[in-house]
Amino acid sequence: MPRLTLRINSGSRQNDNMEDAQLVQDFRGGNHRAFNKLVARWQDRIHHFAYRFFASSDDATEITQKTFIKAYQKLDTLEDVNKFGSWIYTIANNLCLDELKRAGRRRATSYEALKVAPQTENATPADGTVLRNEGLVLLHKALLQLPVDQRVVVIMKEYEGLTFREIAEILDEPENTVKSRLYYGLNALKKTFDSWNINKEVFDYE
Amino acid sequence: MNKETARLLFMDYLYDELEQDQRKELEAYLSHNPGLKKELDELGDVRSMLQHLPVQNPAEQLVMVEPERSGFQDWWNEMIESWLPASGFARAGFAIASLLILFVVMGAFTKMNISVGDGGFNLTFGEKQEIIQQGFTPHQVEMLLQQVREDNAVMISDAIQQAQQQQENRIEKTLVNFADYIEQQRQSDLQMISSGLYNMEETYYDRFRQTDQVLGELIQTVSTRN
């Protein structure tokens, strides 16, 4: 059975944690440039997380900026400097949830529009590239249709490469709850893909 | 293992967080349950499809802290950041190289000379000079000792003479002070005797006058009765 492995090498991750911890300590020691380095190291990951969460580049940019502004203000409260990664994801996740509550009405309308099944049944093999491009859009739409708690877990596990323990720490939930949400999330995605006639072959056109 | 416990391990299995023993146990169980294996494969397909999800990177750094340029600390941090390499190993090498350069430069300025000879390791600064003499002969040592003895004798003699002189001065000063004291005491006694004689004279004179007065009155009284 093919297995997809996104786990980052543990040694590399440990070095990353040490570098983050050193930068946090440098910042606390008065070196503000250290924070700019932290931003440079983490902004792509936070931006990706927010982009996958909202499927909007503007929202992702806004969430990323808010995340680092809040991190700048609260970095002195970080108890364990070796857990900067989990801490920054916690901030980003909370800001995403706040944004959903704030703009819930607008986004709910948007989700309603997504529930209309795409018309891919009549496409021909010659339209493979079109299908693939449409499939990529639909992937994101399917992800957005997931309940928020499942969507967060899928993004963190599938794209951010976090361990179940790290996700449980970020969300302040038991590990089994995280695994359960991921299981139901993947099953829900499978049903959505089936209903939209999307399968692996759609993405084989390069 | 049953279907429920097998499903509980699906996520750990898919994301490679399952212990080796459990992985083998699950795979063995799935080999006898094709329906459950199909379910797991479908979840794996979902994962492989999700991997195609596009993503966008931010075009530039979205947040930039501009530190207040308040003084030496910021300037120093900037210097360190711009000059020193990033890794600790490279920084250590940089530091060693800097020390070596500093050592060479200082050596050039101070005309440092390092040599190794029979006598051991020599480190000198300034112009190199030939060593004129490395020690003293026995005769020179004897002369030096004689010279030291004579110097010591002269020094001790001077010290004794000086001490005697100080002692004489101190005795002379004491005698002078004693003579002054005796003289003062004599003057005081003479003044006291003189004063006593004067008072005694005054007393006799008064009594003499009183006697004359009484005799006069007596004579006058006798004359009046006669």
Image (spheres, grey):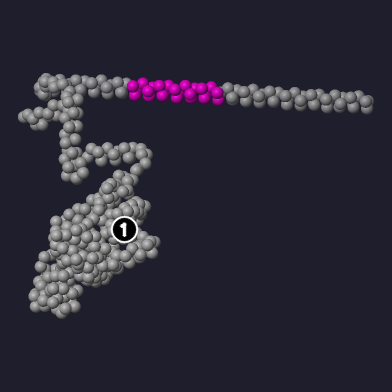
Instruction: Name the foreground residue: A168 vs A200.
Output: A200
Quarter of the figure with residue A125: bottom left
Give the residue displayed 33% in from the left and 22% down from the top: B162
Q: Position of residue B172 (x, y in %)?
A: 43, 21
Mark 1 belongs to which amino acid? Ala
Q: Which span of residues is magenta-colored?
A: B162-185
Instruction: Name the foreground residue: B145 vs A9.
Output: A9
Q: Position of residue B218 (x, y in %)?
A: 86, 27
Could you tell me if residue B147 is visible in this image? yes
> Quick check: B100 left or right of A117?
left
Give the residue displayed 38% in from the left and 24% down from the top: B167
Mark 1 highlights which residue? A92
Quarter of the figure with residue B29: bottom left
- The question of residue B166 being in magenta is answered with yes
Could you tell me if residue A79 is visible in this image? no
Give the residue displayed 17% in from the left and 57% down from the top: A129
Q: Position of residue B192 (x, y in %)?
A: 62, 25
Instruction: Name the foreground residue: B158 vs A136.
Output: A136
Vertical relation: B118 (above or below) B146: below
Give the residue displayed 13% in from the left and 77% down from the top: B35
